[in-house]
Image: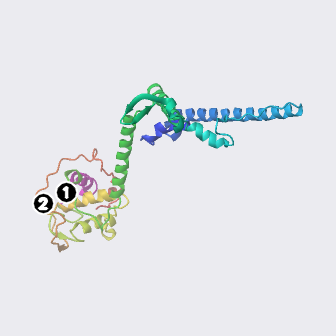
């Protein structure tokens, strides 16, 4: 019976997408379940007590010389003499008119030699039917009078939980990005995020338009450490301490480093206002994507203060460290 109260709330949705504890989520079901459990234990205890009193009373009568005829808990019917208790119980549970006495329950309806009987339903079927009625009453009381969540509410909670799990999974994938699997990002949202990171952290050394300053020019085809995505990402990640460029591994997530690397990658071929002379070696790219390095990249204006990838690194910049 305890399951009648607990299972409906647990079957369709194991837990809502919230920070509540299990007890807070299913407080009513737990209380009702415990109440029913206590009632069952009380009934068993009372029955045990009555049996014990019966035994004591029987012993007292025996001491007084009173002899009573032994009565069976399940009466013995005709033809059941010598049959054990459990066999009689099984017969009652599947009670039906024997074939030899079918004439007693036969109706006057007959078709093609088949007679219709007015036999009673088996007790096991009736008990099951009564149980479904009781279950329906408890079920409706729970959902319509206790203001418990409906199936639709539990479905929406499960969908929200699944969405949050997907977001956590995708975030974990972002943290798996490294120089061995980094790829060029071409989505506008990612390029704009990379631009915001670049303007906040890199433009002081490389100029806002990538023309170079303290650091090298990003718009020509000459690179000091390689001009493909793997090389650019590695340079950002590990830095070049000997030339004053810090490692950004501890300050930018792998995805943010990929975004800013993609933005720098697409600067090649642009026309800066005051380009710095080429540095390093000529690097001809085997392009990671069908993106022409000479094509103008359309970027939406991104406000670093409102961009989710905004990184405040003023302290590092004030110390003269740059990317």
Q: Position of residue 76 (x, y in %)?
A: 67, 36
Q: Quadrant of residue 222?
A: bottom left
For mark 2, does the 10 Å Cα neighbourhood hold few (<14), some (14 to 19), or many (20 or more) residues? some
Residue 198 colored in magenta in the image: yes
Badge 2 marks a residue whose secondary structure is loop
Main SS of the magenta segment? helix
Q: As displayed, is residue 182 above or below residue 119?
A: below
Q: Residues within 10 Å of mark 1 (few under 14, many from 20)?
A: some
- Does residue 116 belong to the magenta stretch? no
Q: Is residue 272 placed above or below 230 in the rendered structure?
A: above
* Total numbered circles: 2
Horizontal side of 237 relative to 285 (left or right) equals right
Write down the quadrant of residue 81 in the picture. Answer: top right
The circle on residue 270 is: 2
Of 128 and 321, the residue lying toward us: 128
Q: Which residues are magenta?
A: 191-210
Query: x%, y% of residue 139?
Result: 47, 31
Q: Which residue is mark 1?
A: 186
Q: Residue at x 39, y 31 (%)?
A: 110
- Can residue 62 be seen in the rendering of this structure? yes
Residue 96 appears in the picture as rendered = no
């Amino acid at each position: 019976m305890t399951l009648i109260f607990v299972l409906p709330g647990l079957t369709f949705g194991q837990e809502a997408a919230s920070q509540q504890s299990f007890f807070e989520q299913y407080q009513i079901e737990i209380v009702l379940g415990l109440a029913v459990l206590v009632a069952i234990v009380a009934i068993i205890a009372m029955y045990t007590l009555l049996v014990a009193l019966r035994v004591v009373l029987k012993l007292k009568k025996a001491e007084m010389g009173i002899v009573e005829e032994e009565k069976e808990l399940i009466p013995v019917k005709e033809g059941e003499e010598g049959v054990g208790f459990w066999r009689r119980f099984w017969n009652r549970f599947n009670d039906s008119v024997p074939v030899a006495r079918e004439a007693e329950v036969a109706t006057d309806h007959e078709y093609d030699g088949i007679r219709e009987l007015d036999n009673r339903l088996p007790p096991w079927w009736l008990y099951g039917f009564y149980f479904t009625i009781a279950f329906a009453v408890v079920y409706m009381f729970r959902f319509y009078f206790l203001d418990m969540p409906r199936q639709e509410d539990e479905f929406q909670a499960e969908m929200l939980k699944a969405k949050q799990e997907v977001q956590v999974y995708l975030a974990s994938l972002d943290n798996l990005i490294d120089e061995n699997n980094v790829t060029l990002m071409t989505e506008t949202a990612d390029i704009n995020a990379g631009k915001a990171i670049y303007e906040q952290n890199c433009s002081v050394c490389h100029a806002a338009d990538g023309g170079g300053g303290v650091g090298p020019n990003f718009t020509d085809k000459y690179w000091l450490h390689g001009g493909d995505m793997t090389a650019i990402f590695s340079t950002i990640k590990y830095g070049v301490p000997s030339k004053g460029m810090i490692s950004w591994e501890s300050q930018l997530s792998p995805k943010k480093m990929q975004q800013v690397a993609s933005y720098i990658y697409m600067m090649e071929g642009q026309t800066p206002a005051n380009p710095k002379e080429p540095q390093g070696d000529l690097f001809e790219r085997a392009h990671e994507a069908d993106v022409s390095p000479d094509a103008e990249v359309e970027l939406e204006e991104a406000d670093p203060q409102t961009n989710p990838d905004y990184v405040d690194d003023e302290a590092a910049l004030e110390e003269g460290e740059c990317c």
